[in-house]
Image (cartoon, rainbow, N blue to C red):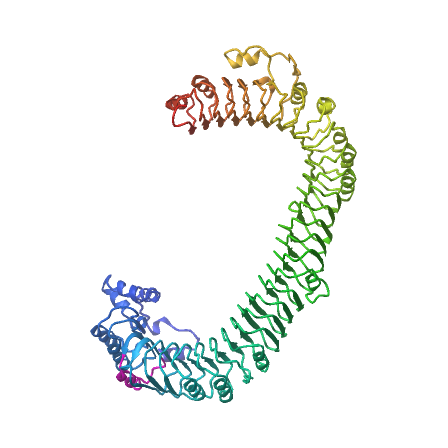
Amino acid sequence: MGGSAGNDSGGTLKIDDFEVRMDLTNDLLHMVFTFLGDIDLCRAARVCRQWREASSHEDFWRYLNFENRYISPQQFDDMCRRYPNATGVNVYGTPAINSLAMKAVSSLRNLEVLTLGKGQLGESFFLMVTDCHALKSLTVNDATLGNGIQEIPIFHDRLHDLQIVKCRVLRVSIRCPLLETLSLKRSSMPHAVLNCPLLRDLDIASCHKLSDAAIRSAAMSCPLLESLDMSNCSSVSDETVREIARVCVNLTVLDASYCSNISLESVRLPMLTVLKLHSCEGITSASMVAIAHSHSLKILELDNCSLLTSVSLDLAHLENIRLVHCRKFVDLNLRSSVLSSITVSNCPSLQRINIISNALKKLVLQKQESLTWLALQCPFLQEVDLTECESLTNSICKVFSDGGGCPVLRSLVLDSCESLTAVSFCSTSLVNLSLGGCRAITSVELRCPHLELVSLDGCDHLERASFYPVGLKSLNLGICPKLNVLHIEAPQMVSLELKGCGILSDASINCPLLTSLDASFCSQLKDDCLSATTLSCPLIESLVLMSCPSICPIGLLSLRCLPNLTYLDLSYTFLVNLQPVFDSCLYLKVLKLQACKYLADSSLEPLYKDGALPALCELDLSYGTLCQSAIEKLLTCCTHLTHVSLNGCVNMHDLNWGFHGDMPSEMHTHYGSFASSVGDVFLPTEQSDRLLQNLNCVGCPNIKKVVIPPMARCVHLSSLNLSLSTNLKEVGVSCCNLCFLNLSNSYSLEILKLDCPRLTSLFLQSCNIDEEAVEAAISQCTMLETLDVRFCPKISPLSMGRLRAACPSLKRIFSSLAQT
């Protein structure tokens, strides 16, 4: 075939030169089976002969994994004969590991990786390992080596990785000229002899029985050692560390955590890059002098060093430092151009921090309650979190202002820093500032043109606030009830909430793009402030002045400076007339006058006589004292209103767009008999359709009758709420688009007549109406889906079938479980 290819002068193969044979089924099976594990392959072998042959291919059994499974020596012997080219075996946790391990090293000549444990291994196994020439990695975990009183020799010429972890043995002798990684972690051996000239990584962590001399001898026999873990070896002394450093000149990683006898005061480790000293009781500030000579140090961990009081290091390569639970630690001074990570936590005595770094971007120092002084020279620092640093004083503001050493700082969190009283920042980079829970702050001054977000939650003692200038788009100061002086210059701000600033008397607001201002309950806000605000914020569309009793008609005249004003809330004010509103707010769409009890009955005449506020859609007169006549004229003539609220109007007696005689039995006959002028209600002969969509008359105690006939032309009315009208007795409604009708808790209701073909929800909870009246009313509502007749004393739960029969479209009926 190769010759044919070589003689083809055209550079292509001819199909006639050779024949390609391929069984696609077997190839596809082989491809699919490569994704299966050992157990799944065994299950697949039970399907059929073809699958059994495919699953037994030696490609899938290079690694024989029997970890924590039962396999007999005979079965294992069979597997070794069937797959003699296997390169890996794992018999950890299997019964009779000694015999299985010996079988593996004697039968599998290509064995490279062997893992075993949880049992006893005799000396004979380790002697046989010597003849397993292909072996490169041996792991023995949680096993007893030998009989416990003899030396175990491990000799191998090609072994690269040896793990003797959590093993019981008296003495071990290791001679492996190519060994690079050795772990004796958690093994209980008092003696270890090493002859591994190429060893680079040695782990003897938690070898409690190894003496100081044994550790020194073992490490010093490996001159090329680069990484040494001797954590939890409590016998280690400074002399041992010093001798190891002298011999192992390439040592770069040292973990001496929980070594209580070392102080490193007289030790020099010039090549070290990683040093871990967790819970080393001998480490003190004097130790830092020695560590300062480790000029290549990159990572330093000093957690739980209980006697450490100060750290002062100038290391050019230091990247990461940890100081956690150092209870006597007071002073931190770091200088490193590449320092990028600092972890300081639960150091209750820490008072001073000085950091110089060109790489630090984020600094978190939460809950350092004694920290009083902080100096930073970090040109690339962007985020700082000092949450619950309770002792920080106002001087911290200079650190994070321009010229303070953090020129690109974007986010600063000072939540619950309860010693701050006067906060002042001048920063051209700050974007996010949080002062939540700083209850002692009385003044805030921010000159941060790019500031987009500020949190003042819980700053309930704030009295003076100046934002001049800032890049905020919205600001909520409603959580600052003691605020009395406010100055804002925010070119991008569109929303400002001052709700609840009850003693705010001096407010200068210069926000040319502001569209929404809520000054609810700002009882000290006066006309001059409102006038100045309307001049500097001409784009305001929504203005809430609810419960601002100091605003007078003179101040309302300034609203003419707001040509885009469409929403105005003057609820709970002492206004007597609304002429300034009618003159100034020509494009108003929503006007709320809740509880304006001093309004004269004639105050609304410009609306229904002169056509004032032609764009008005929503009017709220709830809880007012306007007379019945004024309300009737408003409802009759202002046909452009879409939403009207008359909740709690005590002077409203009837809502009658019909005549005042008795209603005939047939509603359509009755509605056809209305004249163009009836009683006190004026209905023009040529009347256009009303635009009214929602009408709310909740809790009107004196209303007794509601009649809305077809001639009222409420063709757009979709929601009518008359709930809690305790004296309401009679309701007659004919509206082609009404969808929602609520008469709940109208205890006196007896008569209900409906001609509402699109009504979907009817609520009659706690009404005194009888079954026959309800049945007759809903029979004309062909789209009704929800009916609520709970707690209606005259409607029995047993009559639900009659109601469903009267209105087949019903899907949900809410009724009491028992008759009341």
The percent position of residue 494, horizontal first and vertical second, equals 69, 46
* In this picture, residue 450 sits left or right of residue 771: right
The percent position of residue 86, horizontal first and vertical second, equals 30, 76
Question: Camera-side residue: 584 or 117?
Answer: 117
Q: Residue at the spot x=25%, y=72% of the render?
A: 95
The percent position of residue 56, horizontal first and vertical second, equals 27, 69
Q: Quadrant of the C terminus?
A: top left
Q: Tell me: residue 72, above or below residue 410.
A: below
Determine if the magenta segment contains residue 130.
Answer: yes
Question: Camera-side residue: 480 or 799?
Answer: 480
Q: Quadrant of the N terminus?
A: bottom left
Q: Residue at the spot x=64%, y=63% of the render?
A: 382
Q: How many numbered circles does the render carry?
A: 0
Q: Tell me: residue 308, above or below residue 370.
A: below
Q: Residue at the spot x=60%, y=72% of the render?
A: 339
The percent position of residue 675, horizontal first and vertical second, equals 62, 11
* In this picture, residue 609 sits left or right of residue 727: right
Determine if the magenta segment contains residue 143.
Answer: no
Question: Camera-side residue: 671 or 452?
Answer: 452
Q: Tell me: residue 32, above or below residue 490.
A: below
Please provide the residue range marked out in magenta: 121-137
* In this picture, residue 397 sits left or right of residue 5: right
Q: Quadrant of residue 737?
A: top right
* In this picture, residue 704 sits left or right of residue 562: left
Q: Tell me: residue 798, above or below residue 383.
A: above
